[in-house]
Structure formats: C-alpha cells, structure tokens
C-alpha cells in the first residue's frame, strides 16, 4: 500500500502522458492523488478521466509546497511517493520504489533518471554529459523528478516548507547512507530543447539551493558536494573538453543569475522548461 502524490500546475500538455505510465502500475490498495494548484487550463479535467484510480484535489493557490501539503493531508498510506507532473515512469519503477521503502532499505529513495534527448540541441546534450557524470549526481535523489519516503522517513519533518527546492530540502534531511537510487527503477526526464531553456531551469535550481542554504543552513551538513574534484577527473579526458566548456558556461551563468534573483526572492515567479512540455 502506498500513496502517490502529484502536484500539477497548468500541466494539461503532459499530465496524461504521465498518468498513462503510472496508473497501470498501481496496486489495488494504492492511492494516487493529483493536486491541481492554481490551474487555468484543463489539468484537473484530464486527470479526472482516470477516476477512480486517480483522486483529484483542486486549489486556487498556485504553489507546489502547498499542493504537496494538501496531498499529504489527504493521503492515508505509506510509503509516500512524490512525482512531478511531467515525469514518466518506466515499467516496474513504482513497485520497485515501493518495495525498497517498505523494507526500509532506504528512508528516502528515488528512481534513476533516464534522459530523453529527442528534442535537445548538441549544447544541451553536452551539458548533461558532464552533469550526469559528477559524483554528486550519482549519489541519488538528483534530477529524477520523483522521490519516495518511508513512514519513518516522512516523520523527519512536519510539512513541506515554502521553498523552491522541495527535493533539495528532502535530500538534505537524510545522510547519504539513508537515501539512494533504487536499482531497476527508472524515470524518464525530458531534456530542454535549447540552452536558453536549460539556463532557465538551472537558474531556478541554483536559486533553490541558495534559498535552502539561507533558511536551513544546518541541513547542509548532510550534503557532500565535490564539484571541483569531479570536474578535475573529467577534465583529464580531452574528448570531454568541448562538453566541459558548455557545462562551465551554464554553471557559472546560472550561479550569477541566481545570485541576482536572490535579492528579489519574495517576488520570484516559478520558471520551468516549456520546450519539453509538448
């Protein structure tokens, strides 16, 4: 038995694609709760086509943390699995994730992301070639678009705080030995089509990290980020140098832009990649 929670804000273009992969994997006792938050499109209507397997909750508040909390309040089961509305699950991903959390192999666990580069430019592919090889990204719960918590893991916090990086907050709650990727469980993450869209989501990611460090500095003791060491290893391979140039451009540019936006954090408008939402 598990509760799967999907926060969705104006995801009419992709939500059926996601539900088609998740609903067939539901066990009879599972519940899937979709929280349509601040939607001005037909996200909720499309999701209701999958009733009774999907329970739809609507709120006028366009906020992912608020949607996650509403879903949690409605959920009755453990483990809890939180899934982004634009992420597809590969066959067996959901039962494998549930099994690992029920056995408490991990208190917090994620799928292994499989990148879909079908619309991505060379520069986007080059960036991810470096990023996915970094030790920090291989440690789990990074970039998969889905994570789950056992009952004991969910007890680590009362409710989702109002943060950009909900996944970063959850990851930071657990030591490396308590979290990880589940073997054989894969999620499909669609890469942005261009460097422009990639930069947008990386600025959001950097801003989320900075906000997390600002509001919860004590949590960062669970994080070990050796970006420099990882890059030095990769730069020892000359064939990767062109990709490394793209990676550094995005890394430096997104850090600089996020630092500027940090001064206006209260007025931040959520940026997402629209190029992959077709």
Image: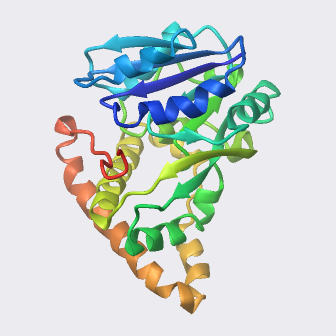
Relative height, residue 247 to residue 242 (above, below): above
- Specify whether 205 is left or right of 51: left
Relative height, residue 201 to residue 12 (above, below): below
Q: Nearer the viewer, residue 208 or 184?
A: 184
**Residue 49 x, y percent position in the rendering:** 45, 16
- Specify whether 51 is left or right of 41: right
Q: Residue furthest front?
A: 49
**Residue 125 x, y percent position in the rendering:** 46, 70
**Image quarter in which the C terminus is found:** top left
Residue at 68 percent across and 27 percent down: it is 25
Q: Nearer the viewer, residue 67 or 267?
A: 67
**Residue 1 x, y percent position in the rendering:** 72, 15
Colouring style: rainbow
Residue at 53 percent across and 71 percent down: it is 129
Residue 196 visible in this rendered orientation of the protein: yes
Q: Residue furthest bottom?
A: 238
Relative height, residue 29 to residue 265 (above, below): above
């Amino acid at each position: 038995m598990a509760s799967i929670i999907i926060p969705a804000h104006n995801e009419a273009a992709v939500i059926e694609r996601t539900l088609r992969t998740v609903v067939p994997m539901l066990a009879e006792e599972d519940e899937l709760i979709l929280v349509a938050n601040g939607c001005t499109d037909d996200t909720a209507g499309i999701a209701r086509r999958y009733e009774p397997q999907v329970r739809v909750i609507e709120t006028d508040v366009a906020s992912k943390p608020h949607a996650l909390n509403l879903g949690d309040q409605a959920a009755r089961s453990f483990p809890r699995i939180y899934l982004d509305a634009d992420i597809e699950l590969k066959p067996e991903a959901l039962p494998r994730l549930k099994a690992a959390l029920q056995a408490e192999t991990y208190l917090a666990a994620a799928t292994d992301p499989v990148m879909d580069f079908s619309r991505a430019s060379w520069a986007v592919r080059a960036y991810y070639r470096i990023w996915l090889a970094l030790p920090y990204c291989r440690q789990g719960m990074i970039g998969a678009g889905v994570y789950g918590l056992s009952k004991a893991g969910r007890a680590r916090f009362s409710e989702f705080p109002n943060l950009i990086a909900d996944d970063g907050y959850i990851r930071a709650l657990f030591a490396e030995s308590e979290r990880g990727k589940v073997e054989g469980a894969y999620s499909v993450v669609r890469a942005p089509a261009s460097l422009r869209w990639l930069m947008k989501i990386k600025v959001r990611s950097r801003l989320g990290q900075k906000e997390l460090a600002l509001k919860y500095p004590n949590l960062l003791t669970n994080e070990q980020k050796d970006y420099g060491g990882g890059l030095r290893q990769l730069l020892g391979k000359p064939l990767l140098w062109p990709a490394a140039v793209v990676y550094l451009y995005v890394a430096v540019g997104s850090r600089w832009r996020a630092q500027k936006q940090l001064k206006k954090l209260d007025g931040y408008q959520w940026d997402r990649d629209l190029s992959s939402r077709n």
